[in-house]
Image (cartoon, coloured by chain):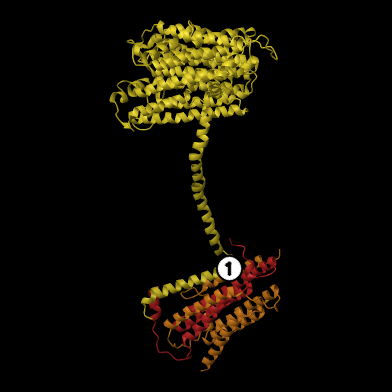
């Protein structure tokens, strides 16, 4: 049943191959149309899948069952261990299907306008389709190894798309950085996969996370260095997810990834790829909760610290895309923290549900923010906030949609961000007051820097001179903005807990107005401060920056994380590990081979003198040989005969 | 091999008419000296023709050996003599060809020193 | 008695002239010494009552081959000049090989061949030789005869081909 879901996966990869091979031969507009049509079909099918799953077939006896329409064995390693490829539908994967296909469709339509006239238009659409395929495959993976395969595919697509403008050295460096950092984290992911599959003898999610499955049912007691093996495995897997989701300290690639085209940032680095880590933890949540609760605690703290840190840095950035990048890091940290404080089952699983809800809403308003930023950049031809101001007169649609997204991310009702953030705050409040405090402060900072961004772009001056008057973007760029803005307004009212929950049993949630009013309060305070400082141009920001100058400079330089990483890699890893290994390889391994060849040469040079070309030498040897044979035969063989 | 050695040593010598008192060893010594003089000449000469001449010496010594052994050990048979005959014929043929080759070399190199013809080396 | 004297004369001629032939520095003299050696060998064949063999030796070896050598020598070098001295680096191994070989040979001869043999004066009939050369019974040599004639033919053709003027 529901085997049409196979088309959701196969169509984008076919489109990638088609556009990749034949794209150069068709006009750019045609390639764009093909890509967009493919994604439209995928989006429609995803909606049908969602409707069918949630309303027709999914709920059996009050529980949403996992449906596996498609699963075939790809590689058999041993009797029990085999890598399958398949499609698994359960609430979170269906929700992710909807999110990914919607945002991808919006980005496809938007790129028709934004990337118009760019070199490599067809390549862009091919890569977008490849990315869609990889991300869709990641969320419907039936086993962890398939997820890993698509994980790496997503990394490759991201690398290709960040480095899309491959003639720019900064873009190439950014794409390399993204790939290397995520790949480094994926090493730990792989080790985690191997550890967990070694002990549980299976890769598939169904058996890993089922309560009677091999891990949870048997309480495997193996330990390593005093910590249980499951905790090690889950920690390693989380590190892999942290790399992809830009948690501290692996966040360094995300701000640089803004070198890619803005629609790419919207799709990959705001809405879909960076939430892969969150999705991974959510997918393996029963294992985390029952098998490694300590790790879950660590995850929550890492999330909270990252959220706060990213929010502080975002307050000081001047490139609008960088602000949005740090905002993304901060919001994903929210989701991770929500997972970290979550329990399991029903009301206790509020954090899980809140995390997924926030993922859902965040995808839409963050994509909206990025696409709006793209619209602004398209009009002003620059990324820096200093070159903008007073754009509300020239770009009304962008202005309104951007405002809606800012209100949503700040957590102002009735927009969707308020509902999802509120649930996260409630979950944190119930679990740990320190975490709640971190998230609370971060919420205020979020409101502050988002409205700082808003005011600097759209208000601020009265007589800003532009070289040429900025104009509103074309229709194919504004339609996605309007659609996403509508979604941002509407999705807050979706009763999410009816569909997604930690044990797949729907439950009821209600707004706890005590916590909700606190969060609205801090958001309003943040907006107010931003309004005072940035609505009209004044010198207040400089005064504040000067008064905390050391801290301000550190925040401006993103707390020197890049420098620390470069120091670690260049001075420590290169010098202490790579150089000796390289020396060994060059001198011992290669040297051994060279020694073999040079000794052969030496011996042959010494021996070849025998072939002197001189006949008399040959005859001499011949004759002496004959003599020796005669002597040996006669004296040692015939000596027994009478003389 | 031990069998044929026995064969040589077990040949009976009947009482025969004494013709000459030249021992077999004398003939063999002569042919040995001729042979090893040929060896020495082959290994030490520079001119290709002199090398060929030393070769003739060696062949001649071997022919003499055949004839002498035939006469002394198998007086009634004449295989040795005929072998010598054919050996002389073969040696003549081989000398002719060798000299033809040497003439060719002389045409190309303008001399016939054997150390100039050493291209088939390393 | 006479036979012995003739043998020793011929033996001394052979020994002396063969050594002279291989050590002489003038080529034509070496060729001449070789000629003497060949004629003396023919004499030895006569002493052994191998008249046909002696004739063939004189006719083919001394008369044919040596003439060929003399022609070639005159064609390829200035016959009167002395050749260059050969370096002792080449003489040493040659002498060593020759002497060692001679010693080994001498040892074998001395230890194994000791009889004073008596020769039967078998009169080898020319008719018998001819019949043997042409006969096909056992101990008759038609096949080698024909083989050698083919060999000689091949030799003639080969020699002309190799040495022809281009």
Mark 1 — on which chain does it sit?
A
Position of the N terminus of chain A by quadrant: top left
Task: Please give left or right for residue A1 compared with residue A616 in the image.
Answer: left
Q: Is residue C132 visible?
A: no
Q: Which residue is at 51% across, 52% downward?
A: A595
Q: Position of residue B77 (x, y in %)?
A: 46, 80
In the rendered structure, the colour chosen for chain C is: orange
Residue placed under numbered mark 1 in the picture: A615
Q: Position of residue B15 (x, y in %)?
A: 40, 89
Q: Is residue B71 visible?
A: yes
Residue toward you, B35 or A516: A516
Chain letter matching colour red = B
Q: Position of residue A119 (x, y in %)?
A: 64, 23
Which residue appears farthest toward the left when viewing the image? A218
Chain letter matching colour yellow = A
Q: Picture quarter containing residue B44?
A: bottom right
Residue toward you, A50 or C113: A50
Residue toward you, A421 or A183: A421
């Amino acid at each position: 049943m529901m085997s049409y879901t196979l088309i959701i996966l196969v169509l984008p990869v076919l489109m990638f191959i088609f556009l990749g091979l034949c794209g150069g031969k068709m006009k750019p507009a045609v390639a764009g149309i093909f890509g967009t049509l493919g994604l439209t079909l995928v989006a429609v099918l995803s909606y049908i899948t969602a409707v069918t799953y949630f309303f027709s077939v999914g709920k059996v006896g009050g529980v949403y069952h996992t449906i596996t329409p498609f699963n075939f064995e790809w590689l058999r390693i041993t009797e029990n261990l085999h890598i399958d490829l398949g499609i698994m539908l359960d609430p979170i994967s269906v929700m992710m299907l909807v999110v990914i296909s919607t945002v991808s469709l919006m980005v496809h339509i938007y790129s028709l306008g934004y990337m118009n006239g760019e070199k490599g238009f067809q390549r862009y659409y091919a890569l977008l389709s490849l990315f869609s395929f990889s991300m869709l495959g990641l969320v419907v993976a039936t086993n962890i190894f398939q997820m890993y395969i698509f994980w790496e595919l997503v990394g490759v697509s991201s690398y290709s798309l960040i480095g899309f403008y491959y003639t720019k050295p900064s873009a190439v460096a950014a794409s390399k950085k993204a790939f290397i950092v995520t790949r480094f984290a994926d090493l730990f992911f792989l080790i985690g996969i191997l550890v967990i599959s070694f002990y549980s003898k299976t890769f598939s999610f169904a058996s890993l996370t089922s309560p009677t499955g091999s891990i949870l049912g048997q309480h495997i007691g193996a330990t390593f260095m005093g910590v249980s093996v499951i905790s090690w495995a889950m920690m390693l897997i989380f590190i892999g997810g942290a790399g992809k989701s830009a948690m501290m300290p692996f966040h360094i690639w995300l701000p640089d990834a803004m070198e890619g085209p803005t629609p790419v940032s919207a799709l990959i680095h705001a809405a879909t790829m960076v939430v892969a880590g969150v999705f991974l933890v959510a997918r393996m949540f029963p294992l985390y909760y029952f098998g490694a609760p300590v790790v879950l605690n660590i995850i929550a703290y890492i999330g909270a610290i990252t959220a706060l840190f990213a929010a502080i840095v975002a307050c000081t950035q001047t490139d609008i895309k960088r602000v949005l990048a740090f905002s993304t890091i901060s919001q994903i940290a929210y989701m991770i923290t929500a997972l970290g404080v979550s329990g399991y089952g029903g009301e206790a699983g509020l954090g899980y549900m809140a995390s997924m809800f926030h993922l859902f809403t965040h995808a839409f308003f963050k994509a909206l923010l990025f696409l709006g930023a793209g619209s602004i950049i398209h009009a002003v031809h620059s990324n820096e906030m200093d070159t903008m101001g007073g754009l509300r007169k020239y770009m009304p649609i962008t202005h309104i949609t951007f405002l809606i997204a800012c209100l949503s991310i700040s957590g102002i009702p009735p927009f969707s961000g308020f509902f999802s953030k509120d649930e996260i705050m409630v979950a944190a409040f119930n679990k740990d007051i320190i975490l709640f405090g971190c998230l609370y402060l971060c919420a205020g900072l979020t409101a502050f820097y988002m409205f700082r961004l808003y005011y600097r772009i759209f208000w601020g001056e009265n007589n800003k001179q532009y070289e040429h008057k900025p104009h509103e973007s074309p229709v194919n760029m504004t339609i996605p903005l309007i659609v996403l803005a509508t979604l941002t307004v509407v999705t807050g009212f979706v009763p999410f807990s009816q569909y997604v929950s930690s044990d797949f049993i729907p439950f009821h949630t209600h707004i706890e107005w005590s916590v909700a009013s606190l969060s609205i309060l801090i958001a309003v305070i943040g907006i107010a401060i931003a309004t005072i400082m940035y609505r009209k141009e004044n010198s207040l920001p400089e005064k504040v920056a000067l008064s905390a100058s050391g801290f301000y400079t550190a925040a401006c330089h993103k707390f020197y994380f890049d420098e620390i990483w470069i120091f670690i890699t260049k001075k420590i890893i290169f010098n202490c590990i790579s150089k000796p290994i390289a020396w060994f390889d060059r001198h011992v391994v290669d040297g051994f081979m060279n020694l073999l060849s040079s000794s052969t040469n030496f011996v042959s040079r010494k021996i070849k003198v025998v072939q002197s070309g001189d006949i008399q030498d040959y005859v001499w040897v011949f004759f002496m040989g004959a003599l020796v044979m005669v002597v040996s035969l006669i004296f040692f063989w015939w000596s027994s005969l009478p003389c | 091999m031990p069998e044929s050695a026995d064969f040589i040593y077990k040949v009976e010598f009947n009482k025969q008419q004494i013709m000459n008192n030249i021992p077999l060893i004398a003939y063999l010594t002569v042919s040995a000296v001729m042979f090893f003089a040929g060896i020495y000449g082959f290994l030490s000469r520079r001119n290709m023709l002199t090398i060929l001449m030393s070769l003739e010496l060696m062949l001649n010594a071997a022919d003499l050996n055949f004839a002498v052994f035939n006469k002394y050990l198998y007086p009634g048979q004449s295989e040795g003599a005929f072998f010598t005959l054919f050996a002389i014929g073969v040696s003549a043929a081989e000398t002719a060809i060798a000299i033809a080759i040497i003439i060719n070399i002389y045409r190309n190199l303008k001399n016939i020193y054997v150390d100039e013809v050493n291209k088939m080396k390393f | 008695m006479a036979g012995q004297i003739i043998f020793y004369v011929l033996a001394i001629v052979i020994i002396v002239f063969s050594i002279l032939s291989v050590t002489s520095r003038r080529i034509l003299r070496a060729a001449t010494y070789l000629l003497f050696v060949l004629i003396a060998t023919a004499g030895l064949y006569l002493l052994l009552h191998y008249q046909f063999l002696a004739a063939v030796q004189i006719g083919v070896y001394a008369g044919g081959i040596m003439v060929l050598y003399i022609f070639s020598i005159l064609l390829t070098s200035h016959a009167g000049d002395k050749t260059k001295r050969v370096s002792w680096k080449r003489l040493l191994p040659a002498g060593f090989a020759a002497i060692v070989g001679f010693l080994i040979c001498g040892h074998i001869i001395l230890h194994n061949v000791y009889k004073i043999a008596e020769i039967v004066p078998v009169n080898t009939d020319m008719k018998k030789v001819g019949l043997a050369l042409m006969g096909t019974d056992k101990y008759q040599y038609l096949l080698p005869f024909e083989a050698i004639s083919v060999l000689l033919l091949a030799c003639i053709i080969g020699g002309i081909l190799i040495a022809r003027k281009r």
